[in-house]
Image (spheres, grey):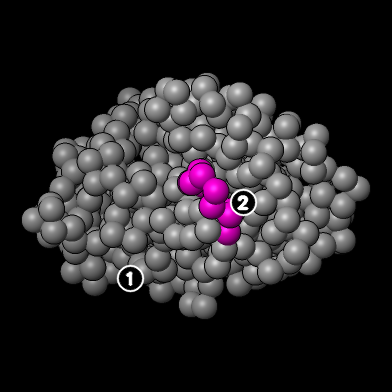
């Protein structure tokens, strides 16, 4: 293949968790097959499509391992835990002996007279609580539970960080993996963590803010939930590794943290909040400006909404998230870059599937689309799991997908 000039621009548009399984209520179509995505349908016919295995065998299918992979970092080499990456994004200081923990503020059932262990895990995101509201609740927890060993740091929405000084990387259960289950069997074996979770429930369940949330029909954010333990990360420089100056556009602390670790810049887009109603156009236009005006070679646009809707188990809302990605991000980016006259290549892909049936991540391969504005193909396929698999194009090691983008 011919060598790409330095003026070529590169984009990854990642729809978190948007891959799925055939769903009976959709006539055994997947979300990608059922969604109304006219721009993707058009673009796919000018593109290469195929499947990519983003999560190495034996590793948990998280957005952490999968996004590292899509960005070109082999998780088997670079992954040290999810929470340390999020800690990087919010500027949390870590020593080599510190352990970072994700601290979700979740919804636990409030059955009268029932012990904490016998309550049920209702919602991992507490009705997609705002950062402002969750900050008030986290401060109440901090006043009661913070000490020289455990420190609490505010993140985004329901996603926060706890640093455990001189701690251990212990096995912890992600709350979105056990929705609808009893709390007890999913509690940490470590007594100090287990007790803090129980105490947080007592602190938060009757907090005035949660009383108001319940009056409004919103889920109360009534318990801390620890998971994703890990040590201080050490990623190599993205620019030194690829020769490309890169920028990250995401509402999620995990992705921002990966960018910090990789020496990429983060662009904060007002109104980008990781929900179904995020600022899609704002993300797309930020990428166009970064590539055409601000001297960046590469933009990674991460959209969380499909994954969140998968965790909620909502077919309708996940379809809407994919349709928003199609019409408000992918179309805006591709048309904007074409208008600028910049030659460009773009990959569209999920990081992992988040099947509606399971409401959590799985490690199966996902469909990718690779479009080159200078070499439009002539194909008949559409972008979805079945047709991508039928193409017979397959990237076995997810961290090598980016090599296809850069044509190394």
Say which residue appears at 87% left-offset and 45% top-offset: 147
Q: Which residues are magenta?
A: 108-117
The front one of 110 and 224 is: 110
* 164, 373: nearer the viewer: 164
Q: Work out whether 383 lies above or below 290.
A: below
Q: Where does the image place residue 330, in percent across and percent down from the top left?
A: 32, 37
Q: Residue at x 40, y 27 (%)?
A: 217
> In screen coordinates, is 259 left or right of 344?
right
Q: Nearer the viewer, mark 2 or mark 1?
A: 2
Q: Residue furthest right?
A: 148
Pick the front one: 221 or 352: 221
- Whole-percent x, y for residue 68 in the image: 56, 58
Local packing at callout 2 (Cα closer than 10 Å; few below 14, some 14-19, many 20+) is: many
Q: Please tell me the numbered disc located at residue 225.
A: 2
Q: CA distance from mark 2 to mark 1?
A: 37 Å
Task: Tell me what residue is drawn at x 58 percent, y 54 percent.
Answer: 115
For the point 48% across and 77% down, the residue is 57
The reply to whether callout 2 and callout 1 are in contact (CB within 8 Å) is no
Q: Position of residue 384 (x, y in %)?
A: 22, 56
Give the quarter of the figure containing the N terminus. bottom left
Q: Say what secondary structure mark 1 lies in.
A: strand
Give the labeled residue for mark 1: 394
Classify 383 as above or below 322: below
Predominant secondary structure, magenta span: loop
Residue 184 lies in quadrant: bottom right
């Amino acid at each position: 293949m011919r060598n790409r000039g330095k003026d070529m621009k590169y984009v990854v548009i990642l729809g978190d968790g948007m891959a799925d399984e055939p769903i009976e209520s959709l006539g055994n179509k997947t979300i990608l097959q059922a969604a109304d995505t006219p721009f993707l349908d058009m673009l796919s016919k000018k593109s290469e499509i195929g499947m990519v295995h983003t999560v190495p065998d034996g590793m948990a299918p998280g957005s952490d391992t999968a996004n590292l992979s899509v960005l070109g970092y082999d998780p088997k080499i670079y992954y040290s835990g999810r929470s340390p990456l999020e800690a990087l994004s919010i500027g949390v200081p870590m020593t080599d002996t510190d352990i970072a923990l994700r601290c979700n503020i979740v919804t636990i059932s409030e059955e009268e007279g029932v012990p904490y262990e016998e309550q049920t895990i209702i919602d991992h995101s507490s009705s997609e609580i705002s950062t402002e509201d969750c900050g008030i609740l986290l401060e109440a927890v901090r006043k009661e539970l913070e000490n020289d060993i455990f420190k609490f740091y505010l993140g985004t929405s329901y996603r926060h960080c706890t640093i455990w000084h001189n701690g251990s990387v212990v096995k912890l259960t992600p709350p979105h993996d056990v929705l609808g289950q009893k709390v007890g069997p999913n509690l940490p074996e470590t007594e100090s963590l287990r007790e803090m979770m129980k105490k947080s429930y007592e602190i938060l369940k009757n907090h005035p803010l949660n009383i108001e949330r319940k009056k409004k029909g919103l889920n109360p954010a009534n318990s801390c939930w620890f998971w994703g333990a890990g040590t201080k990360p050490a990623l190599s420089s993205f620019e030194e590794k690829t020769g490309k100056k890169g920028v990250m556009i995401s509402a999620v602390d995990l992705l921002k943290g990966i960018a910090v670790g990789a020496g990429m810049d983060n662009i904060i887009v007002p109104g980008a909040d990781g929900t179904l109603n995020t600022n899609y156009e704002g993300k797309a236009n930020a990428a166009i400006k970064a590539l055409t005006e601000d001297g960046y070679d590469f933009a990674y646009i991460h959209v969380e909404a499909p994954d969140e809707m998968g965790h909620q188990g909502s077919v309708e809302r996940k379809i809407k998230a994919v349709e928003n990605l199609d019409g408000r991000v992918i179309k805006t980016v591709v048309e904007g870059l074409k208008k600028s006259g910049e030659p460009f290549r773009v990959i569209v892909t999920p990081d992992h599937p988040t099947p509606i049936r399971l409401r959590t991540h799985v490690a199966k391969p996902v469909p990718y689309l690779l479009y080159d504005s200078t070499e439009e193909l002539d194909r008949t396929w559409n972008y979805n799991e079945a047709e991508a698999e039928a193409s017979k194009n397959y990237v076995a090691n997810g961290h090598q997908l980016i090599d296809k983008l850069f044509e190394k």
